[in-house]
Image (cartoon, grey):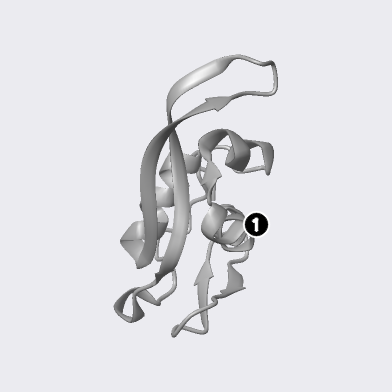
Amino acid sequence: MPKQNVTVSLPNLVPEVVVSPSLAAALTQLINVGTQGATTLELQAAGCLHPSVSVSRLKKLGAQIVTQRCMAIDSHGTEHSRIAHYTYAGWSAKGAHIDSDDKDIGGRT
């Protein structure tokens, strides 16, 4: 059975966007953390298995997400340099449409 798309309310000029559940999880997390943003490790801890893929797909759909590199420490205390840090900055009105690629990340439908 194909997965249902999820509607995510956006905090800017575009009121909402419809995306797959995996993209909705990443987008909702980035919106919820606000200007603090989230690292790859934090998004993974929140249930987003492939943050870089999710962010890339969201950007293609119209999300304005700022990506920077930073140092982060994982849950085991290991220091990682050059971890991606993402900050949601808005959504382009041109990109507000349904994700036509209904495959979930990992290739499943």
- Above or below residue 101? Residue 78 is above
Q: Residue at x 46, y 54 (%)?
A: 87
Foreground of the two, 13 or 101: 13
The image quarter containing residue 33 is: bottom right
**Count of picture labels:** 1
Foreground of the two, 10 or 23: 10
- Above or below residue 57? Residue 80 is above
Per the image, label 1 sits on a secondary structure element best described as loop
Image quadrant occupied by the N terminus: bottom right
Q: Is residue 26 visible?
A: yes
Mark 1 neighbour class, 10 Å CA radius: few under 14, some 14 to 19, many 20 or more: few
Q: Residue at x 54, y 77 (%)?
A: 11
Q: Residue at x 40, y 76 (%)?
A: 97
The image quarter containing residue 64 is: bottom left
Q: Is residue 27 left or right of residue 97?
A: right
Locate residue 6, reporting x and y percent. 61, 68
- Above or below residue 87? Residue 91 is below
Locate residue 37, reporting x and y percent. 53, 51
Q: Residue at x 39, y 77 (%)?
A: 96
Locate residue 17, reporting x and y percent. 50, 75
- Above or below residue 82? Residue 7 is below
Q: Is residue 2 visible?
A: no
Locate residue 3, reporting x and y percent. 62, 59
What residue does disc 1 label?
1
Foreground of the two, 61 or 103: 61
Q: Is residue 107 left or right of residue 43?
A: left
Q: Amino acid at mark 1?
A: Met
